[in-house]
Image (spheres, grey):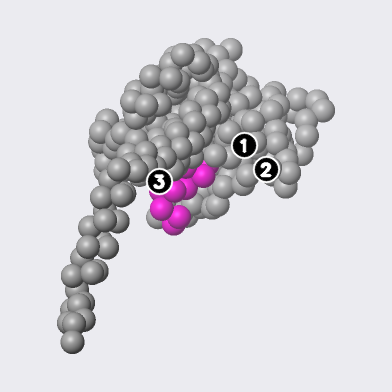
Amino acid sequence: MTPQVLQEYNSAVDKLATKQDKSTDELKFLADYFSTVLKFEAFNLPENLPTDELPSRLPDSTVTIKLNELVVKPELFDGKNPKPRKWIEDFIDAYESNGWNDTIAVKYFKTWLIGPAKDWYVKEVRPYITKTTKWSDIYEKFKEQYLVTGMLKLQHFVNNVVQRSDEPIELFIPRYRRALQMLHPLISQAELVRKIIEKLRPEYKKDVILYNPSTVMELHQYCVRIEMGLTAQRGSDSGRSKPFNRSRSKRRNSMTQSSSSDSFPRNRPR
């Protein structure tokens, strides 16, 4: 990068950072972002980048969250602890439970990184973040760095798993849904429903299709109803007894009496 382009970039940064009515959190975000980018990643900008495009590289700094009011808060991740797969699952859980959008997830992803994981983010992720960066882009980079082997196993699981004969809906749907969302963070509800139905046992599948559920929650509710009906039917079948056969019972009693009388010697006449 030429000194002229770098100077133009600094000028654009100054204008954005001095914007009126900025919150403390926004100012901290800008300060942290630019102090690092200008020191380490500015050379990634093309030399002929027009000045008016420079601010567009930056994520939206006006969207903020209150960390002390989160419904679910991820643990700090250093690259090894917690286990990468568990940590990213927890982050996705926080993403969903807190109602985040792409902008928030991208902006605050680094908040829970420390040590080597934070170093990886600074070198391999932050230089490529722009206003159009999506959470799925960040997730793919995390997957490439920490989950290559685990993702191969997860893909094998997703391809081959089916609902076991003794597995209740309450266990199967959540575990399969989690695996699908780990592989495809932006998978739609319709696609989730379709894939889950494919893996259900036949006695569920044939009935749940009639309900035509549009969300995983609806699918789960319908499957619970079907499961309750199947359980009741099995209980009714097992409680039924065979018809009582009177003639067979009489023959059995007669044989028992005859056997009993032959078991004891008769008194001989004197």
Main SS class of the magenta portion in the image: helix
- Circle 3 Cα neighbour tier, 10 Å, few/some/many (<14 / 14–19 / ≥20): some
The residue type indicated by label 3 comes to: Arg
Of residue 112 and residue 221, the one placed in the foreground of this image is 221
Please check the rendered image and state whether residue 85 is part of the magenta-colored stretch, yes or no.
yes
Q: Is residue 207 above or below residue 109?
A: above
Q: Which residue is mark 3?
A: 85
Q: Which residue is mark 1?
A: 97
Label 1 and label 3: CA atoms lie apart by 18 Å
Helix, strand, or loop for circle 2? loop
Image-quadrant location for residue 82: bottom left
The residue type indicated by label 2 comes to: Val
Please check the rendered image and state whether residue 114 is part of the magenta-colored stretch, yes or no.
no
Q: Is residue 223 above or below residue 267?
A: above
Q: Is residue 247 above or below residue 140?
A: below
Specify the quadrant that holds the C terminus. bottom left
- Circle 2 Cα neighbour tier, 10 Å, few/some/many (<14 / 14–19 / ≥20): few
- Circle 1 Cα neighbour tier, 10 Å, few/some/many (<14 / 14–19 / ≥20): few
**What is the number of the mark on residue 71?**
2
Identify the residue shown where x is 57% and y is 47%: 74
Q: Nearer the viewer, mark 1 or mark 3?
A: 1
